[in-house]
């Protein structure tokens, strides 16, 4: 992902989970913003067999400059799995 700026809309966030998502019943990204506010973004399965999740940012998703923590959470009928936490930085305008 290239440099991302505060209040950007339409940024694609793509994560490889490393597991087959064919029978997943729920796929989300748990997100901690720089203020430590925690939110949930509903991810879509972009490629089930290869375990790829995607989320496209909307208004207010990237409303803070700083480091964001993102962790996939995938639910199946009989199990819930957390993925490895990733980080990305959101920059203030003009930086």
Image (cartoon, helix red, strand yellow):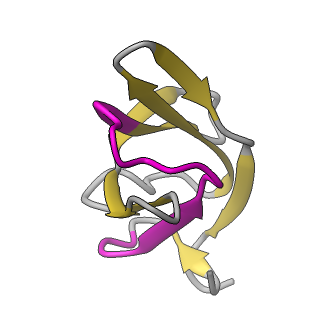
Q: Residue 14: horizontal and vertical position, in percent?
A: 50, 68
For the point 64% across and 28% down, the residue is 36
From the viewer's side, name the closer residue of 25 and 37. 25
- The quadrant of the picture occupied by the C terminus is bottom right
From the viewer's side, name the closer residue of 75 and 36. 75
For the point 41% across and 73% down, the residue is 12
From the viewer's side, name the closer residue of 3 and 30. 30
For the point 45% across and 57% down, the residue is 62
75 w.r.t. 64: above or below: above
Q: Residue 81: horizontal and vertical position, in percent?
A: 58, 26
Q: Residue 27: horizontal and vertical position, in percent?
A: 37, 39
Q: Is residue 51 magenta?
A: no
19 w.r.t. 16: above or below: above
Quadrant assignment, res 92: bottom right
Q: Residue 31: horizontal and vertical position, in percent?
A: 54, 38
Q: Is residue 14 magenta?
A: yes
Quadrant assignment, res 48: bottom left
Quadrant assignment, res 8: bottom left
The answer to whether residue 56 of the structure is visible from this angle is no
Left or right: 76, with 5 as reference point: left
The answer to whether residue 95 of the structure is visible from this angle is yes
Q: Residue furthest top?
A: 78
- The quadrant of the picture occupied by the N terminus is bottom right
81 w.r.t. 2: above or below: above
Tell me which secondary structure the magenta stretch mostly adopts: loop
- The part of the chain drawn in magenta is 8-27
For the point 51% across and 58% down, the residue is 51
């Amino acid at each position: 992902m290239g440099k991302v700026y505060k209040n950007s809309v339409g940024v694609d966030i793509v994560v490889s989970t490393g597991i087959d998502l064919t029978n997943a019943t729920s796929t989300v990204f748990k997100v901690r913003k720089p203020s430590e506010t925690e939110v949930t973004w509903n991810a879509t399965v972009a490629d089930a067999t290869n375990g790829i999740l995607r989320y496209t940012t909307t208004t207010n998703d990237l409303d803070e400059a700083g480091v964001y923590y993102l962790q996939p959470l995938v639910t199946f009928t009989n199990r819930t799995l957390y993925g490895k936490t990733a980080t990305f930085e959101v920059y203030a305008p003009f930086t």
